[in-house]
Amino acid sequence: MPRASWRPLIGYSTNVHRGEDLKAIRRYLREYTVPVRDRVYGRGAPAGLELRLGARSAADLGDPAARESFRAFLEDARLELFSINAFPLLDFHARRVKEKVYRPSWAEPDRARITNDIARIFAEILPAGGTGSISTLGGAFRRAPASLRSREGMARGYLDTVRHLARIEEETGRTIVLAAEPEPETTLETVRDVVEFFEGSLLPIALGRSRGAGRARAEAELRKFFTVNLDTCHASVLFEDPARSLRDLRKAGIEVGKLHVTSALSVRNPARSPAYEDLKAMDEPRYFHQFAGRDATGTVTWRGLDLDELPERDEVRRRGIVELRSHYHVPLYRRKWKRLDTTREETRLAVLEAAAAKRCSHLVVETYTWPLLASEDRLVEGIAREIEWLLDTLAEAGVDARGELRPGASGAAAKPGASPYNRPRERTLLPRARRADPRPVRGRSRPG
């Protein structure tokens, strides 16, 4: 149901920063997140946070004293943790990430185990009165061995975590939802894939475990705790309109727990456009940048796993491709990147759709590719400009998201001054300089 008092929580994903342990997380929150907050909202103002937690940082936070210390650290920094990015569980800034980002899959027991650990940690840090979200892999890598992408195995893994989240709510009163993230080359690429998996695998297994009135409770539990993290870039790459995707999920009765606000790259008439060479030059060794091309009828007729698969122009011309898009996250405020177009307008319309529907209240900027696009001394400026673009887009919809944050990530009514972040800070966190990434990648540019 739409929420009359809907108020979005805004943040950016810290998966843009290098660091897998708790010490590194504290460092980058001081050096980057706090300065971004100060630039956007004013020095010392409260701000929302999507924190990336992987297997190593979750292990560090397994210690109760470490959890309490980190909770106090966030409170002192006036960073309100409302969401966790648990899609990449291994090193997300290794020299080569690519297929490793999909391990473990949801058919492997370690995915549910680590996600459940993260949820328990989150429950102890999540501010009272709020709803938290945990974004995660959409099943498995489509090119993985069959054992890693068993639909029954994946469904059972998801249901294990759904039950775990329900128990957390029963024990603590804190609601945390799982948000599976559709992405090209994963089990759940599109909304259609999500609905088919939900209705064909998740729901039948959940109902099969219950009898009588318990079946209705099982379905309600599944629909409450299994949601989607719609990444607008991922949808646009496959020429799936993100705003329509939001509407289609609502029609299917599947909630969107989080919206990753992102833009993809686009080349129109790639057989003739000089921008095609710019796209080929952006191939790099760390991440996959899947691509899709459509013909004059609007049909997607060409797919590729990474930019090194792009052929010479003659082959593009032979295929009759009129537009090519790539999974390469680029700054939201940029209509163009070099000579390349972006899908910013589709992203803007998706944000406006979310604001009109007043259902999903977690809106997160996730341009994790910043270290590939610009030197790290430009990160604070670039991320701040992206958040400002998102705030301006919400203002276009009549939503003022620049004021002080209040407890209640789900949009529940808030009492002024009730948030633990609306108190004087005991100390100031000062940013410290950090040297640039010594590993050069082709295609870098300054944010413009």
Image (cartoon, rainbow, N blue to C red):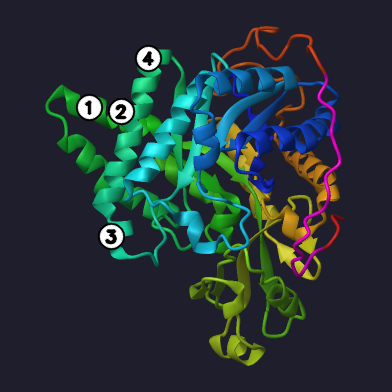
Q: Which residue is mark 4?
A: 171
Q: Earlier in the sequence, mark 3 or mark 4?
A: 3
Q: Is residue 437 magenta?
A: yes
Residue type beneath disc 2: Ala
Residue at the spot x=86%, y=41% of the render? 433
Q: At numbered mark 3, what does the secondary structure look like: helix, strand or loop?
A: helix
Residue type beneath disc 3: Ser
Residue at the spot x=83%, y=62% of the render? 445
Q: Which residue is mark 2?
A: 220
Residue numbers of the magenta segment:
428-444
Do the residues under discs 1 and 2 have CB atoms within 8 angstroms? Answer: yes
Q: Earlier in the sequence, mark 4 or mark 2?
A: 4
Q: Earlier in the sequence, mark 4 or mark 1?
A: 4
Residue at the spot x=86%, y=58% of the render? 446
Do the residues under discs 4 and 2 have CB atoms within 8 angstroms? Answer: no
Do the residues under discs 2 and 3 have CB atoms within 8 angstroms? Answer: no
Q: Which residue is mark 3?
A: 147
Q: At numbered mark 2, what does the secondary structure look like: helix, strand or loop?
A: helix
Horizontal and vertical percent position of residue 378: 85, 49
Left or right of residue 100, residue 161 in this image:
left
Q: Which residue is mark 1?
A: 216
Horizontal and vertical percent position of residue 399: 70, 29
Horizontal and vertical percent position of residue 46: 74, 21
For the residues labelled 3 and 4, the Cα–Cα distance comes to 34 Å
Q: Is residue 435 magenta?
A: yes
